[in-house]
Every structure is written in structure tokens, then in C-alpha cells.
Image (cartoon, rainbow, N blue to C red):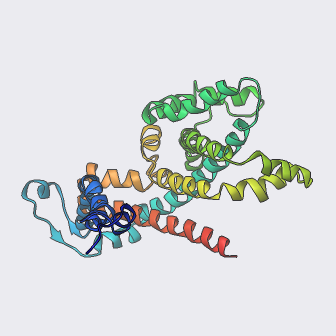
């Protein structure tokens, strides 16, 4: 006569339908949970990107908004970017200015993070002051900085002249180099707080035992930073570099408010060129191709950053 299974045997065999429930929990339920978010992401991001890509291959003007009709022109819009001297210059300026802002943002952000990681009187007041630029609206901040760099009554010229430099009446926004220098100050000033706070969070995860060990080994402050601290912060720094690249390569508000891309389009970057072609000239095809060109540049530099880190880790 068969005996009833013990409690242990029931446990090992599992309850009826338990394996099916486990497959549902492990395979189907996660998909169901993320489906609403994926639908929202595709609707808000995926469709506009695909629509922009579609328009970049067509000649679409104001009439296309009402009729929905546009003419297929292939790669003509992209060819115009490479052949038009103004647009070609905007591409070069975007890359140079973007890389300069990323470098300045990372250097200043890491330096401020190292400062805030130490103990000194008034530390929390400094932290609040560091966060203020990040909290300010970009348009409002750019307007204030435009006044600060004013050639006649700006504070910057007054302060530099007071230090003995010949900056009285200096017009910052006439020369492209000085104009980009002023804009770069604003961009870096508003970008570095996020980097500083993120790197500070990473610094506080480093054990004190690591610092004590380097001190015992007789390492200098620069050696600890170069060979211990920065390598341990590499994942955070990579994320910050990628985010800074995305932000700084598509800077719009500061340039539009301070120079509008002038004089004579000398401070025009791809974001300003995209706005001008799409919403001023109503050339949506060329504007879309400029937006996709910016997207490709960002993907290119992001892949380079990741490859460099992987190659370094493989050594």
C-alpha cells in the first residue's frame, strides 16, 4: 500500500503548477512590468527620432505641415551640410567648443569634489553655493552673464581693469574667440555642479583603509589621486564624461541668448543651425538632417569613450 508523501518530499517536488508560476515570474512578469514604460519611451523618444530621420531624407517645407507631402531627396541634405561653408564651420565649431567645455566641466567638477571631500569650516555653505548655478534656469543665467560681460557697464571688464588688465570697453561678443570664451564660462559654470556632486558621492564610497594604506606606503597627494582615487572613480567619471558630452555638444540656450549665433554666424553651432534652418527658414528637411548629424556625432564620441576605457582595462 502506498504511503502518503512526507512534508519534505512535497517541498522537494513543489506544489502543482509551481514551475509554471516560476516561469511566469521570471520571464513574463518583468516584461509586463516594463511594457508601460517602454511604450511611453517609444512614444516620446522613438517616434520623434524616426520621424526626424525620415524628414532628413526629404525636402519638407511649410506646406508639408498641412499637406503632409514631401519630396524624397536622398542624401542631398547631408551633402549640403558638408558642402555649405557655414554649416561645415558649425560642425567644426561644435566639436571644438563641445570638447573644450567637457574638459573644463570635468576638471572643475573633480577639483570641487576633492575640495568638498575634505573637512573645512563653512563646507556646507560652499556646497550650497556650488549647487546654485545648477539650479538656475539656463536662460536666466545666460541673461545675467550677458550683462556681466557687457562692454560698457559689465562687471567682468570692470573687475579685470581693476586688476591692472586693459579690458576697459572690451567687446566680448564681437570676436568669435572671446565670445566663445564667455559662453564657455557660462556653460562650464552651470555644468560642473552635477559632476562635482556625482564625483563627491563616489569619493565618499572609497574606504578610509585605502587612503591609510597609501599614506603608509609614502605616496604623495598627486600619486594617491592619479594611481588610486581616479582609477577607483573610473565608472563614475565615464558616465559624467558621456553626459557632459551630450549636454555640451547640444548647447543652445546660452549661445542663443548671449550671441544668437552672431556676429555673422561666427558663433553658430549645430543646435543654433538646426533651429535657424527648421524654425526660421522653415526648411524642415535640412533641419532634421542637422539634428541627425548631431546625434551621430554624440554616438561617435560616446563609443570612443567606452572603447578607450575597455582598452585601458584590458591592458
Give the quadrant of residue 28.
bottom left
Residue 20 position by quadrant: bottom left
Image coordinates for residue 234, horizontal then vertical, percent: 64, 58
Residue at 77%, 28% in the rendered image: 120
From the top left corner, tell me how far across and down residue 169 is, in percent: 62, 31
Depth check: give the residue in front, 103 or 269: 103
| Residue at (65, 24) in percent of width and height | 125
Decide if residue 306 is on the left or right side of residue 226.
left
State the quadrant of the C terminus.
bottom right
Q: Is residue 193 above or below residue 227?
A: above
Quick one: 248 or 64, which is closer to the camera?
248
Q: Is residue 113 above or below residue 84?
A: above
The location of residue 186, given as percent across then percent down, is: 55, 39
Quadrant of the snapshot with the N terminus: bottom left
Compared across the picture, whether 185 is left or right of 228 comes to: left
What residue do we see at 85% from left, 52% from top?
213
Residue 240: give x, y in percent of width and height.
Answer: 56, 52
Tell which residue pokes out farthest to the left in this image. Answer: 67
Q: Is residue 37 above or below residue 307?
A: above
Report if residue 150 is visible in the image.
no
Total labels: the figure holds 0
- Identify which residue is drawn at 61% across, 32% down: 130
Q: Residue furthest front?
A: 1
Amino acid at each position: 500500500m502506498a504511503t502518503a508523501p512526507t512534508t519534505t518530499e512535497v517541498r522537494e517536488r513543489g506544489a502543482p503548477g509551481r514551475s509554471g508560476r516560476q516561469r511566469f515570474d521570471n520571464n513574463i512578469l518583468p516584461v509586463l512590468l516594463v511594457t508601460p514604460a517602454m511604450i511611453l519611451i517609444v512614444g516620446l523618444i522613438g517616434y520623434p527620432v524616426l520621424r526626424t530621420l525620415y524628414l532628413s531624407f526629404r525636402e519638407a517645407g511649410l506646406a508639408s505641415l498641412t499637406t503632409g507631402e514631401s519630396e524624397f531627396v536622398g542624401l542631398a541634405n547631408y551633402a549640403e551640410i558638408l558642402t555649405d561653408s557655414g554649416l561645415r564651420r558649425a560642425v567644426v565649431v561644435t566639436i571644438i567648443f563641445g570638447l573644450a567645455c567637457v574638459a573644463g566641466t570635468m576638471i572643475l567638477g573633480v577639483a570641487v569634489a576633492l575640495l568638498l571631500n575634505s573637512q573645512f569650516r563653512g563646507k556646507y555653505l560652499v556646497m550650497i553655493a556650488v549647487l546654485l548655478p545648477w539650479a538656475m534656469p539656463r536662460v536666466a543665467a545666460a541673461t545675467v552673464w550677458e550683462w556681466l560681460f557687457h562692454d560698457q557697464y559689465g562687471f567682468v571688464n570692470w573687475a579685470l581693469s581693476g586688476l591692472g588688465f586693459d579690458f576697459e570697453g572690451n567687446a566680448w561678443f564681437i570676436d568669435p574667440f572671446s565670445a566663445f570664451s564667455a559662453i564657455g564660462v557660462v556653460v562650464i559654470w552651470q555644468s560642473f555642479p552635477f559632476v562635482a556632486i556625482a564625483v563627491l558621492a563616489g569619493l565618499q564610497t572609497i574606504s578610509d583603509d585605502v587612503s591609510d594604506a597609501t599614506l603608509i606606503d609614502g605616496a604623495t597627494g598627486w600619486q594617491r589621486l592619479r594611481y588610486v582615487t581616479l582609477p577607483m572613480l573610473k565608472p563614475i567619471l565615464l558616465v559624467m564624461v558621456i553626459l557632459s558630452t551630450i549636454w555640451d555638444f547640444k548647447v543652445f540656450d546660452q549661445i542663443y541668448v548671449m550671441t544668437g549665433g552672431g556676429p555673422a554666424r561666427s558663433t553658430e553651432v549645430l543646435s543654433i543651425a538646426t533651429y535657424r534652418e527648421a524654425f526660421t527658414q522653415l526648411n524642415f528637411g535640412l533641419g532634421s538632417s542637422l539634428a541627425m548629424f548631431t546625434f551621430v556625432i554624440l554616438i561617435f564620441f560616446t563609443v570612443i569613450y567606452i572603447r578607450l576605457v575597455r582598452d585601458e582595462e584590458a591592458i
